[in-house]
Image: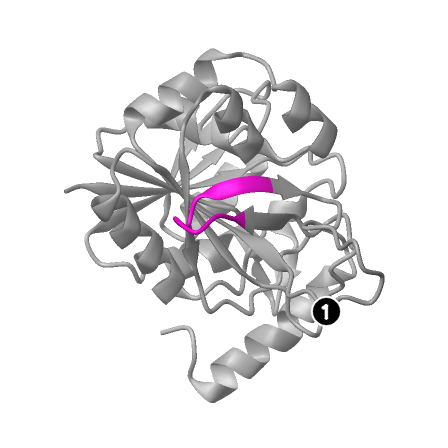
Amino acid sequence: MTTSIIIPARYGSSRYRGKPLVKILGKEMVIRVADICSRIKNAKVYIATDSKKIAKVVKKYGYKYIFTSSNCLTGTDRVAEASNKIRSKIYINVQGDEPTINPKDVRKIINAKKKFPNHVICGYDKVHNFENPSSINLPKVVVNSKGELIYISRALVPGAKKEFQNIQYYKQVCIYAFNKRQLNKFYSTKKKSETESIEDIEILRFFDLNEKIKMVKLNSNSVAVDEIKDVKKAEKLLKKNIFSGRNK
């Protein structure tokens, strides 16, 4: 079963322009992500971008790139557009701002897609002590007893009726798995759903498309680089992982 890992990398991010090329311990972040993905056996790695600057760096490091439109609404739209140029059974979307993800987590997502081919697959993990669950940059997930996504929000969910009730919050880990039908369906809408627009969380579009989303529990302590200040957090974690021999 062929697997393609596509890393969407947009240069003109509204929150952090040029983010894919920010240096993490001396190497561009998108390349850090590609290096991790390249450890997955029997999977091809591509960077989907609308930027010649990003493509030039990708080529320098020997990775393959696919040019996509600058009008893509989300990373998943960019992956969907790129998938039209790749023949594969499984398409993995690994966000280009996750330079500390564990390759084991990517493998878990691939295995889950093989087991549940008709579900969209997405990773999640507990919100760790070093993270602020109230941060709007941290999408929180609510999962049912079947391991399917009920809702995902930048707000604190689930909400507690009792003021001091102790809740373990869970966060989205941005590793997704799709088949071609799911990507085509997502891309064909040509617009964000209402809830997706409000939350600015792309996976919410699948709710309107009546696609079930299977959530896969990961043991991830990765740090997404949403803002400039996150670079130091990612570098600190990356140094720790390198020193301890993790991320193999």
Q: Position of residue 34 (x, y in %)?
A: 42, 54
- Residue occupying image coordinates x 43% and y 51%: 145
- 146 inside magenta stretch: yes
Q: Position of residue 200 (x, y in %)?
A: 68, 33
> Which residue is the extreme one toward the right?
163
Q: Position of residue 104 (x, y in %)?
A: 35, 66
Task: Locate residue 81: give its quadrant.
Answer: top left
> Which residue is the extreme one toward the front?
162
Residue 11 in the image: above or below residue 223:
above
- Residue occupying image coordinates x 21% and y 34%: 89
Please state which amino acid type lies under the numbered disc 1. Asn
Q: Position of residue 192 (x, y in %)?
A: 61, 19
Q: Which residue is denoted by mark 1 in the rendering?
A: 166
- Residue occupying image coordinates x 43% and y 66%: 102
Q: Quadrant of the C terminus?
A: bottom left
Q: Quadrant of the N terminus?
A: top left
Residue range of the region highlighted in magenta in the rendering:
143-151
Helix, strand or loop for disc 1: loop
